[in-house]
Image (cartoon, rainbow, N blue to C red):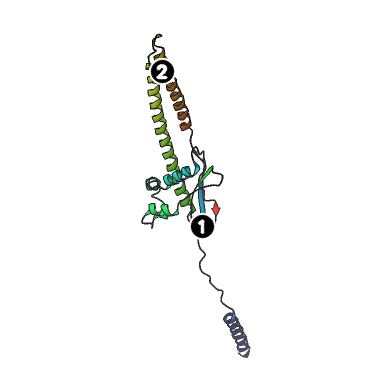
Amino acid sequence: MRRWSRGWSRVMLIAGIGALAVAECPAVAQGPPSAPKTETVLALLQVNIKEEREAFELAQTLLIKSRPSLKLALARLTHLEVFRNVPDPVAWLERNLRVDFADDGQTLRISLHGAQDDDLAAIVNAVTDVYLEQLRMRRERKVEELRTRLRAKIAKASETPEPLDDERENRREARVRRAMLELEVAVLRMQIENALEPQVEIVQRAKGAQAS
């Protein structure tokens, strides 16, 4: 009985020491939850500026960030989680979408910064696709307009009558008119060739690879 009592006393002593050690051990501080990792996702496009640079850059920025363009892009993104609690996605894009040009004047960047990089990449790519589609439609309309004018000039040149030999002055004037028409035809053909060449081509689609 005495041996059992001594054993029980040792157990109680060890338990007391352990409890005291736990009580004296400082608690590990619980810091605030870490902020979600953010990313900058961007698409890169190569530009071929054929007019004054500042005017070109402003025109492209206005086209990309116009409300009709953003609405077209958002129509393809209704499934995204990032817009679930956003009352006005167009206004959100107007505030957060960034459009700028590199110093070399040959690179256009479309980007977004945030935590949901997969959604942001999808948004940037949709905006980029809408922009390129609008440029293509504008180019096609311009080419068709130039071709219409070209056909009219060719028809007019072919209908210009040759003057009689004894009408020297009239013949000189007719030759001048024909030469001017031929020059206009050549200029229109050159304009069509230039219009067929895209001014903007995509180099890299958004992938969300740049961590902040």
Which label was assigned to residue 38?
1
Q: Position of residue 58 (x, y in %)?
A: 45, 46
Mark 2 burial class by Cα count in 10 Å: few <14, some 14-19, many 20+: few
Q: Locate the C terminus by quadrant.
A: bottom right
Task: Determine whether 85 is above or below 64 in the image.
Answer: below
* Circle 2: residue type: Glu
Name the residue: 42% across, 48% down: 65
- Please give the name of the residue rendered at 38% of the width and 57% of the height, measured from the top-left corner: 86
Which residue is situated farthest in the top direction here?
166
Between residue 45 and residue 167, name the one nearer to us.
167
Residue at 39% x, 27% y: name it.
Answer: 149
Q: Amino acid at mark 1?
A: Thr
Structural distance between the alpha carbons of marks 1 and 2? 72 Å
> In which quarter of the view is residue 28 placed?
bottom right
Q: Which residue is mark 2?
A: 173
The answer to whether one can see residue 81 in this image is no
Residue appearing at x 38%, y 52% in the figure: 90
